[in-house]
Image: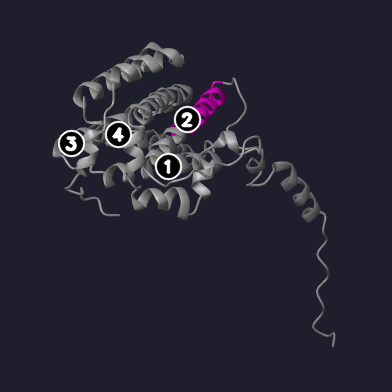
Amino acid sequence: ADLRPSQTTPKILDALTLDNEKVVERERERGVPESSELVKGIFFVLCWTLDRLYEGRPIPKFWVLETVARLPYFSFTSVLHLYESLGWWRTPQLRDIHNAEENNELHHLLIMESLGGNNEWFDRFVALHAAIGYYWVVVVLFVAQPSLAYNFSHLVEEHAYVTYAQFVEENEELLREIPPPPIAREYYVNGDLYYFDKFQTSRREDSKPRRRPPCDNMLDVFSNIRDDEFEHILTMAACEKWWAGDGPTPVPSSEQSSLGKRADWVQWSEEVNSLEPKASLSSSDP
């Protein structure tokens, strides 16, 4: 993929707005998820800094958010790979969910890049350095207590959902006039939807229909991103509760035996061990 900034920003995007005060109001109405003082403190510093740096510049802000939002999934899979390499624990199904989540955030990022969100050197500097720091923060949290790391991501995804919801409401008419970038249609309509379905664990047990959202204009695109963030909230909350011992595994039941069940292996091994080798034919036999 071409990592170079587009260098041009469509003029119509300059008219887009985002009221940070209304975002805060929405968060109060929904209620901030419970968290430790440490995690909550880091989260609020992050949000306060982005709000101040990107006042009146929603698209660059979204690009920075999406750059940072990918990193926890890299952190989760890095630690899970380490545990598996050391022979401590193997859970490829969980890694696959996190890979799908990262793939979703990547496409959000590509959409923001197509809108010129990464054109400015300062924005790229802020996003990439914040991402490196965020990666290691989440790694440390995951090693110390995985539920804390998932709780942190839960807070970030909650903030992203509320922010996009406010943005869509503020700019509905203008967004309806703008055609979607090709990358958005490729992800939501034309491409392989395997990973798109994979990260939405709340819809994997046939309790809810699979999402097949429209993508006819930028209103659809940002509405889809908003709804994606809500699905991330549900997945992170499920992971957090599972690691804390307060809920079922986020891995769908249909995939929990995808690597085989030990009971089946024991039965197979007993059957194989009971077999007697047949005597080989002697060399004198015709």
Return the residue at label 3.
Answer: 125
Regarding residue 199, the answer to whether it shows in the image is yes
Q: Residue at x 38, y 11 (%)?
A: 37
Q: CA distance from mark 3 to mark 1?
A: 23 Å
Mark 3 residue element: helix
Mark 2 residue element: helix
Q: Position of residue 113 (x, y in %)?
A: 27, 44
Q: CA distance from mark 4 to mark 2?
A: 16 Å
Q: Is residue 243 left or right of residue 14?
A: right
Does label 2 or label 1 sit earlier along the sequence?
1
Specify the quadrant that holds the C terminus: bottom right
| Label 4 close to label 3 by CB (< 8 Å) | no
Q: Is residue 242 magenta?
A: yes
The crowding category of the residue bearing disc 1, from other C-alpha atoms within 10 Å (few below 14, some 14 to 19, many at least 20), is many
Name the dominant secondary structure of the magenta segment: helix
Q: Is residue 184 left or right of residue 279?
A: left
Q: CA distance from mark 4 to mark 3?
A: 15 Å
Specify the quadrant that holds the N terminus: bottom left
Instruction: Spot the residue most to the bottom.
Output: 286
Q: Nearer the viewer, mark 4 or mark 1?
A: 4
Does label 4 or label 1 sit earlier along the sequence?
4
Q: Is residue 178 magenta?
A: no
Q: Is 140 rendered above or below residue 22? A: below
Region in magenta:
229-244
Quadrant for residue 276, please give it: bottom right
Q: Position of residue 250 (x, y in %)?
A: 57, 32
Residue closer to the observer: 228 or 76:
228
Q: Nearer the viewer, mark 3 or mark 1?
A: 1
Return the residue at label 2.
Answer: 230
Mark 1 residue element: helix
Q: Residue at x 78, y 54 (%)?
A: 273
Mark drawn on residue 104: 1
